Image: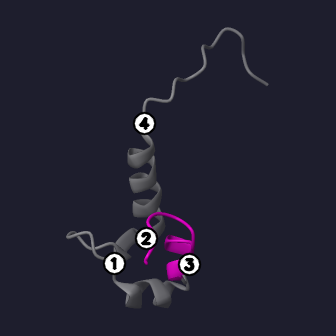
Amino acid sequence: MLDPKIPPQIETQTEEEWEEEVLTKALGDALNTDGSVDFKKLRARGLALTLDELYPEGDGDDES
């Protein structure tokens, strides 16, 4: 339950900053300093990502 004496926190983080934070935490040491991903490390940790998870069909531009 919210305490009426404590004001609610205002979201100051942009969506892009939030996405970067979530991905950085999720990828951990598999995220290289140049922004690339070490998929061997991901597979070794049991974190399987597919292109459909990263870029679901219908998102973004058409490929035609």
Which tag, 1 or 2, sits closer to the chain's start?
Answer: 2
**Front label number (1 vs 2):** 1
Say which amino acid is labelled 3. Answer: Asp
**Is the residue marked by circle 1 packed among few (<14), some (14-19), or many (20+) residues within 10 Å?**
some
Marks 3 and 4, how far apart at CA = 26 Å
Query: Where is mark 3, residue-wise?
Result: 52
The quadrant holding residue 37 is: bottom left
SS under mark 1: loop
Which tag, 1 or 4, sits closer to the chain's start?
Answer: 4
Which residue is drawn at the image coordinates 47% and 56% (left, top)?
22
Query: Where is mark 1, residue-wise?
Result: 37
**Is the residue marked by circle 2 packed among few (<14), some (14-19), or many (20+) residues within 10 Å?**
some
Residue 38 lies, in percent from the top left, at 34, 83
Query: Where is mark 2, residue-wise?
Result: 27
Which residue is drawn at the image coordinates 56% and 78% (left, top)?
52
Say which amino acid is labelled 1. Answer: Val
Which residue is drawn at the image coordinates 74% and 21% (left, top)?
2
SS under mark 4: loop
Say which amino acid is labelled 4. Answer: Gln
Q: Is residue 58 magenta?
A: yes
Residue 54 lies, in percent from the top left, at 50, 72
Q: Could you tell me if the residues under marks 1 and 2 are in contact, i.e. CB atoms within 8 Å?
A: yes
Question: Would you say 16 lies left or right of 51 here?
Answer: left
Q: Nearer the viewer, residue 7 or 60?
A: 60
**Front label number (2 vs 3):** 3
Q: Which mark is residue 5?
A: none
